[in-house]
Image: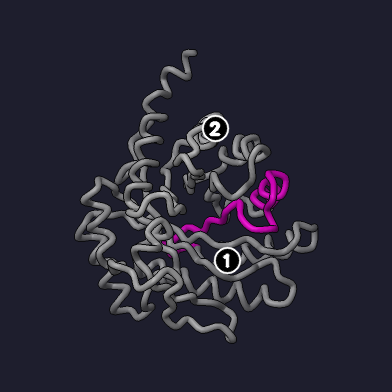
């Protein structure tokens, strides 16, 4: 397999949300404020420091949650892009964390707002934006509405250099049936970010074996219990992705209080996947 530029591992800023602290919850809803909030405390590092922290740990890719951007001013976006360049970090995905293209009341407003993030992603040098397909019940009407709006969004991104992807996430996409229908309907205009942790076990394993053949990127979220990382679950998810033929990058999603230092959880997951990939030849000959 050809080596990926900047390696196979990304980190999402969600994995560092306690360290980063404040959020700025941008939303298409005019009743909501994007003013600074501190749901995870004041934080200990700024977003501008994160590229250097990745480089120090041998990680070459970054994903940023939209609510972790403290400003959308062009001067700040340029400063962050410079920080990425200085540390040789590839901006893999800007994660747009609000909006619902399936909502019958707000879909048009929301998809217009989501489209505005394409230029922001371009200014930051991001390869992709990840958008929500929908939060409504997975019926024919809501799926169709989401598909129409996402097709339009894909058209808005043409020529920008930014690829739009969505995710097996929220109520609209509870299983491979809906996920595959939507991707078929979109005819390649929108890609898939496959998430290992959004669907529930045990049905998620066969679901991943189905959809990960279509994934361009992957949120490799691990579950934790009182003993630590749930190794059996994580390995099974990776096996199903491998079975599907997935060969793209893994975004390390650490979302647990198990480690006081979030980097300990992130790097544990990285080592786990590295060992899994190293064992691939033995699995193929077994």
Is 89 rendered above or below residue 201? below
Q: Kindly indicate the quadrant of the structure image that contains residue 151.
A: bottom right
Residue extending furthest toward the top: 286
Give whichever of 180, 206 is nearer the camera.
206
Front residue of 24 and 177: 24
Quick check: 56 left or right of 247? left
Question: Which residue is farthest right?
Answer: 140
Residue 16 appears in view: yes
- The numbered mark, 1 or 2, whose residue comes first in the sequence reads 1
- Residue extending farthest to the bottom is 31
Numbered range of the magenta stretch? 158-184
Q: Position of residue 222 (x, y in %)?
A: 48, 44
Q: Nearer the viewer, mark 1 or mark 2?
A: 2
Q: Residue at image x 37%, y 59%?
A: 16
Residue 63 horizontal/vertical position (percent): 40, 57
Quadrant of image for the N terminus:
top left
In the image, residue 83 lies at what x, y percent?
23, 64
Q: CA distance from mark 1 to mark 2?
A: 34 Å
Question: In the rendered image, which residue does mark 1 sit on?
Answer: 153
């Amino acid at each position: 397999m050809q080596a990926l530029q900047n390696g196979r591992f990304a980190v999402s800023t969600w994995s560092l949300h306690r360290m980063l602290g404040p959020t700025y919850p941008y939303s298409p809803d005019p009743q909501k404020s994007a003013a600074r909030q501190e749901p995870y405390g004041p934080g200990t590092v700024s977003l501008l420091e994160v590229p250097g922290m990745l480089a120090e740990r041998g990680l070459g890719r970054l994903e940023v949650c939209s609510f972790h951007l403290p400003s959308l001013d062009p001067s700040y976006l340029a400063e962050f892009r410079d920080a990425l360049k200085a540390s040789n970090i590839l901006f893999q995905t800007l994660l747009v964390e609000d909006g619902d293209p399936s909502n019958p009341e707000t879909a048009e407003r929301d998809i217009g707002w989501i489209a505005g993030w394409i230029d922001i992603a371009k200014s930051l040098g991001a390869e992709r934006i990840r958008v929500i397909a929908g939060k409504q019940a997975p019926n024919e009407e809501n799926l169709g509405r989401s598909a129409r709006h996402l097709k339009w969004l894909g058209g808005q991104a043409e020529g920008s250099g930014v690829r739009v992807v969505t995710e097996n996430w929220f109520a609209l996409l509870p299983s491979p049936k809906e996920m595959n229908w939507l991707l078929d309907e979109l005819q390649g205009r929108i890609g898939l970010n496959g998430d290992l942790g959004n669907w529930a076990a045990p049905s998620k394993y066969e679901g991943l074996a189905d959809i990960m053949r279509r994934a361009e990127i992957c949120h490799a979220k691990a579950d934790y219990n009182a003993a630590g990382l749930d190794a059996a679950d994580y390995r099974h998810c990776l096996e199903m992705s491998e079975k599907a033929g997935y060969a793209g990058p893994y975004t390390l999603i650490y979302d647990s209080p198990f480690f006081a230092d979030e980097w300990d959880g992130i790097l544990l997951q990285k080592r786990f996947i590295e060992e899994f990939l190293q064992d691939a030849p033995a699995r193929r000959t077994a």
